[in-house]
Amino acid sequence: MVEWFKHDIPRWMDGTEGLDDGPYRVYHVVCQLIYLHEGPIGVHEQGIAGRCNQHVLTFRRNLKALLDSGKLRIIDGRLTNDRAETELQRVADLRSTSARGGRGSRGVRKRSGRGQSEVEQRSAVGQPDNALNSNSLASSPLFEHQHHREESRGEERREEKKEKKKEDAAPNGARRGELDLGQAETARAKPATADPETDLFRRGKEIFGERAGGSLTAQVLKAKGRNVALARAAIEQASTKQNPREYIGAIIRGNAIEDQTPRVRV
């Protein structure tokens, strides 16, 4: 059974331009069955007609058209196709070549004088003290690749440990465990003053959520003419409401009555 073969499509379709749908369908199915069974097939009208989804009488008429056009032939009561025979012969030749394996090359080598002694001499060049061992793990390319990957991972782990040690260390270089609470509070750096607009967006995300906070803050800032103080006051006022998002939405649309006095959180 041939499950895969080199299909010469142009030659296989040569001369099918004038075929109607029915004969072409029969031609296609019969050729595939010839490939599948690796040779001519019997004329089983009902079986082949069923595969073609055709009535037996229709199949007979279509088969006659193919026989008259020379696309199919009946030899010894069996259906065959010239193109399929050529393709199947190629498959048989490939199987014969594969079955012989390297015996042909080995015979040529022996006839040319390249015997076992020459192979042994070539094998001895370079590393005479190392015996050939195809099962040696260290000599395997896959082992070398895996070993290289493990070394790289080891380097990455060491770098991560170094970074973690730096993070665990206090600002003055001492370990956290060596500092008491008072020393840790003294060593802690004073946070830098944030930009007012950046702090506005941070506050907006705290009140309206991470996903909607940025968008709503940008809209209220635009509604307030990019006045950060007025926008901050509106956000703070919205934080006192039961539904801050609904309230800030009304401010953006201009429907809310709000206190315009800027409020600054302490």
Image (cartoon, grey):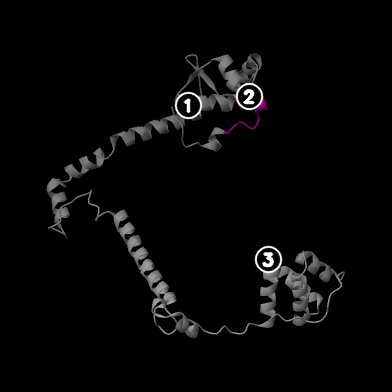
Q: Is residue 155 above or below residue 20?
A: below
Residue type, numbered disc 3: Gly
Mark 3 secondary-structure assignment: loop
Q: Which residue is mark 1?
A: 36
Q: Is residue 71 visible?
A: no
Residue 178 seen in the figure: yes
Alpha carbon of mark 1 to alpha carbon of mark 3: how far? 65 Å
Where is residue 126 drawn, in percent x and y?
17, 60
User: Separation of disc 3 and disc 2 at Cα?
Assistant: 69 Å
Disc 2 secondary structure class = helix
Name the mark nearer the viewer: 1 or 2: 1
Query: Between residues 264 and 86, which one lies in front from this camera angle?
Result: 264
Bounds of the magenta segment: 13-25
CA distance separating discs 1 and 2: 20 Å
* On-image quarter of the N terminus: top left
The residue tagged 3 is: 209
Is 232 displayed left or right of 120 in the figure? right
Q: Position of residue 110 (x, y in %)?
A: 17, 42
Label 1: which secondary element: helix
Q: Residue at x 29, y 38 (%)?
A: 101
| Neighbourhood count class around disc 1 (C-alpha, 10 Å): few under 14, some 14–19, many 20 upward | some
Amino acid type, label 2: Pro
Identify the residue position indicated by label 2 in the image. Answer: 23
Horizontal side of residue 23 vs 101, given as left or right:
right
Q: Main secondary structure of the magenta part?
A: loop
Q: Residues within 10 Å of mark 3 (few under 14, many from 20)?
A: some
